[in-house]
Image (cartoon, grey):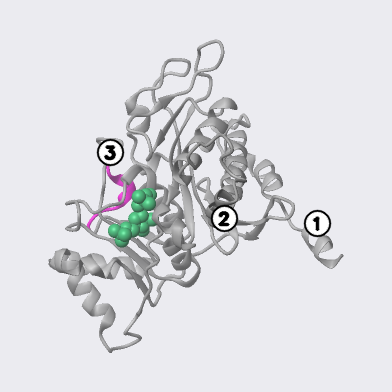
Amino acid sequence: KNTIMNLESGQTLGEFIIENQQDFQYSTGELSRLISSIKLATKVVNHKVNQAGLVDILGKFGAENVQGEEQQKLDVFANEVFIKTLSQREVVCGIASEENDDFIEIVNQQNSTKSKYVVLIDPLDGSSNIDVNVSVGTIFSIYRRVTPEGTPVQMEDFLQPGNKQIAAGYVIYGSSTMLIYTTGNGVNGFTLNPSIGTFYLSHPKMQIPEDGKIYSVNEGNYALFPQGVKNYIKYCQMEEDNRPYTSRYIGSLCADFHRNMLKGGIYIYPSGTKSPNGKLRLLYECNPMAFIAEQAGGKASDGFNRIMDIQPTELHQRVPFFCGSKSMVEKAEEFMAKG
Ligand code: AHM
Ligand code: MG
């Protein structure tokens, strides 16, 4: 009984969205409907992610795939859920997804594009972690289109620098499912109560600690890292002042980023690994996380310059990523500058 009373006194994400609608200039409720649609899709994906470990057992007993269909991969499923949910509600005029080569134009039954927003999304980030029951996430980024409303959406509507983002957020399907987002007026985090399917405001006005003691980088690639990153890692490991720092790497950006948000820390995915610009995508991963980090008082850089000032040239562009507590990112930049 107590639990129910406590929950009822807490603010839900739905209530929060309505109450904060005035955050957006020229607000017509359109962006609120868009964020509500993301909330809905998140719950559908969450339900499926929670069942991931059961698929084999159910399959063995014939309870799954009665038509003999192959079990759909979770990242494909998540991609479809977000695209269908957003397009059917006509809350966006275009979607670009990490899972699709090209962007998708959304038209309504009259064959026109009504909304002025585009969404860029990584529907299931860190999906290689699913099989081992480690947290995965969703990352999204929202822009106002630059081409005229009512006309077909164009590539330039998606290739905008991160500093033009209207909103951004991530979901972490972890020991609890959380949705964290910003509309440029601070960062707020909501935790899902799965028994009633409602997100509650659990982390209001999130602030990333100015400094931290955790560094997250895939050190297996050490030999390939630029000298600046190697030197910074050695600095983290040195016995001096409040060091050595602690090393934590989950391999799920949402989870590593989220831990750093709460405890302070730096996340690095440098160049010089499998691709010359690292692995992470500017539009689906780095820009939204950079917007959230900055809104929480943190910092995001490519090692030299602000992530959100980079002018994108292609949808799936990759970029080195240094993100987290402000002083830690600045320190890493100092090492990068020295080379
Ligand atoms: P994905 O979008 O294909 O899942 O790749 C992104 C993920 C991030 O979540 C994570 O931080 C990174 O890849 C881990 O890469 P690596 O295994 O190379 O360290
Ligand atoms: Mg990803």
**In this view, 18 is above or below 58:** above
The answer to whether residue 106 shows anywhere in this view is: yes
Q: In the image, which residues are magenta?
A: 304-312
Image location of residue 220, percent across then percent down: 24, 68
Res. 95 image quadrant: top left
Looking at the image, do the residues carrying marks 2 and 1 touch, with CB atoms under 8 Å apart?
no
Q: Nearer the viewer, residue 201 or 179?
A: 179
Q: Which residue: 46% across, 56% down?
A: 130
Q: Which amino acid does label 2 sit on?
A: Ile
Looking at the image, do the residues carrying marks 2 and 3 touch, with CB atoms under 8 Å apart?
no
Q: Which mark is residue 312?
A: 3
**Quarter of the image that includes the N terminus:** bottom right
Image location of residue 235, percent across then percent down: 24, 79
Image location of residue 138, percent across then percent down: 48, 49
Name the mark nearer the viewer: 2 or 3: 2
Q: Is mark 1 on a helix, strand or loop?
A: helix
Res. 161 image quadrant: top left
Label 2: which residue?
A: 57
Name the mark nearer the viewer: 2 or 1: 2
Label 1: which residue?
A: 8
**In this view, 32 is above or below 234:** above
